[in-house]
Amino acid sequence: MRAAQAPLLTVEHLSMRFGGLLAIDDLSFSAARGEITAIIGPNGAGKTTVFNCITGFYKPSGGRLLLNLSDATPAADQIDRLTTSGARTAAIPGGELFLLERMPDYEIAARAKVARTFQNIRLFAGMTVLENLIVAQHNRLMAASGWTVLGLLGAPQYREAEASALEKAKYWLDKVGLIERADDPAGDLPYGAQRRLEIARAMCTEPTLLCLDEPAAGLNPRESHDLKRFLKSLQVEHATSLLLIEHDMSVVMEISDHIVVLEYGQKISDGPPDHVRNDPKVIAAYLGVEDEEVEEAEAEITQ
Amino acid sequence: MASLRADAPQSPWRSLANAVTDALGAALLALGLAVPILALRTEQNISNELILQPRWGYVAIAVAGTFAARLGYLLLRSPKRQPRRVKSAVPNSWREIAARSLAVVGLGLLALYPLIALALTGKAGAIKWIDNFGIQIMIYIMLGWGLNIVVGLAGLLDLGYVAFYAVGAYSSALLAQNFGLSFWICLPLAGILAAFWGILLGFPVLRLRGDYLAIVTLAFGEIIRLILINWVPVTGGYAGISGIPRPTLLGLPFNASEEGFAAFFHLEFSPVHRAIFLFYVILALALLTNWVTLRLRRLPIGRAWEALREDEIACRSLGINTTTTKLTAFAIGAGFGGFAGAFFAARQGFISPESFTFMESAIVLAIVVLGGMGSQIGVAIAAVAMIGGTEILRELDWLRRIFGPDFEPTQYRMLLFGLAMVLVMIWKPRGLIAFRMPSIFLSERRRVRADLVQEGHG
């Protein structure tokens, strides 16, 4: 672990209230650059709500979500100045700082380079597998097409951009093993392939932070084994930091560098897998057992 | 027939009995409907008294007809549909060649249509066929293609499309009258103004989704019409605007004057020249709409529209600004509506609010839905069937010989309209052309089945 580096995402005192329900209560954690951070917790703990806050689909009731797209560690007063200025972003040497809670969802994806997948897969079912990956490169292609005007006239620069978008789509199709099915509608793919395609589509936006909402849900053991390798390769080969919600403990414990555990919207544990695995509060939260049964439960989780 | 069903191991007699029972039920329903509607007719006699005239014969015909139709349908319908059709043995490339040659033949026929009409019916008869059929249908094809961008591609249900048609028509008419601009300058201006109105409407409206969007666009269509009626100093109210200058061919007007088209080419003056010219103008405008739409579908903006129709949330997660994407769809669709409106104004020479009722929006939307949302050729076929069909009703004089001299076929327009809709919704619930062609492919362009394609939620 490179502890010296500034964290990519810093969540501070995040809270989210739906009417009388406090879904997330004063949550603080950080996700380090180049690491796989997992958020786990029982059903209804608020994991997906955290994701929706980070990706801008919900506007948090309170707290700060700081994303640092630079190699430098911003000084505390720099961050404070950005926060009090009311601006959404600030340029610092070597990159940019983003306050995600102030940005609309599409800008978080386009500018802050945060991509996500969904718990209930959201593909463009009536478009082909290839088209799904081309749509994901919309912003770059849109600029290359001169906001449609040049593209309409058939400018060569757009044709080049489209060709390179096609190459990138091919690369990712190859990577997730769907190159044979490139021209089939996405809605026709089997479940596991749809999950892989959704990740490939998110990767086509060239994210710095990729948020995966239960990527292993509904996969068979073999598929989930492949998924682990695939996610690891995203981290290593593509320098992507991952934020992961997952119930499959074999996936979480094996690939995560850092785990945050939520229960009833509050953080109950935070640390490397070994620490979390042995935390009695986590075991109790997951299995709802008395203290004397902790050991038994521990054996079950670690198996 | 029923015995041919492979998947139903019922005896033929059994299924016949079932069909008869079902048809009897339908006949009973028809009886229930026909008695209050058809059975009695009120008439005034000479001493001004209302008398009831029974018409049980009609009721019997309706009931028997329903019984026979339902029985026939049940016995002749194809065996239970397979969810996936057997793959066609015809290779895709052949199919594409066939489709392309069909398009070329269709285009050729369209280009030659006025000349064919002229050859078959002579100068006097051809005007009706070129103007009432050709031009009228082409206007609706263009409107259908324009609305197809909004409804078919972007999946935004717009019930007030006629508003942009009206904005185009009125702005071109007002520009021509007040500033003396010619049709060829008014045409692009009208398109731009309509697109501007599309954006103006879009800003408040596009936060809404689905039914709510439909209701607000419907209201917008009515607002425009009411403004046209009530803003008398500018629009002339119910009286409308007349004397709109007709389009000219490079400055040559189509009239009997010395500087006119006929005189310039040493032809005998005939109003059919103008009809032919107008036909080619609207044909060019419609083809421009089609070309732009097909082109846009292959550009990022068009793909974003279709992605928006498929899943708006996924679009936003990929960094697509859905508001501007929706606005562009609205604006471009509205712009084409405006072009069509400007053409309409110039063709008629007179416009009034009566031409821009909700009925027009409904017809254009029906054309898009019938044709298959998103399909260009489907929309064209649907426009020919619907507009050509209603126009052809005027020609069916021979029906009078059967039903008596009082019979007016055009009165049955709405009935046939509804019947056609019901039939299409039964047999082709996703429209006549119910598949989607991918905008890009790796090895082979394969059709996407309609059941996978979303209709959009606004």
Image: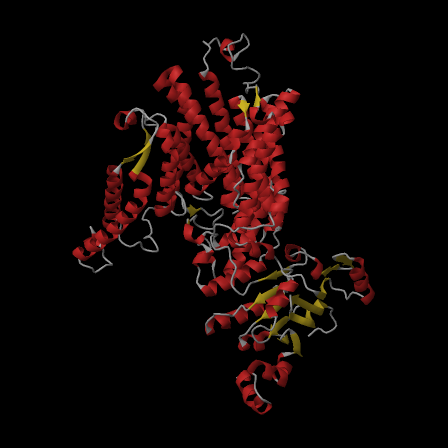
Which residue sits at x=37%, y=39%? B98
Q: Is residue B30 left or right of residue B289?
A: left
Q: Is residue A292 above or below residue A48?
A: below
In this figure, which colouring scheme has been used for the structure?
secondary structure
Nearest to the observer: residue B272 or residue B115? B272
Q: Position of residue A174 (x, y in %)?
A: 50, 60
Quadrant position of residue B366: top left
Q: Is residue B51 above or below residue A146?
A: above
Q: Is residue B134 left or right of residue B242?
A: left
Q: Is residue B105 left or right of residue B215?
A: left
Quadrant position of residue B394: top left
Q: Position of residue B25 (x, y in %)?
A: 26, 51
Nearest to the observer: residue B232 or residue A190? B232
Q: Position of residue B344 (x, y in %)?
A: 52, 27
Q: Is residue B83 left or right of residue A285?
A: left
Which residue sits at x=44%, y=38%? B379
Q: Answer whether residue B120 is visible to the viewer in this image.
A: yes
Q: Position of residue B348 (x, y in %)?
A: 51, 23
Q: Is residue A40 above or below residue A143?
A: below
Q: Answer whether residue A152 is visible to the viewer in this image.
A: no
Quadrant position of residue B97: top left
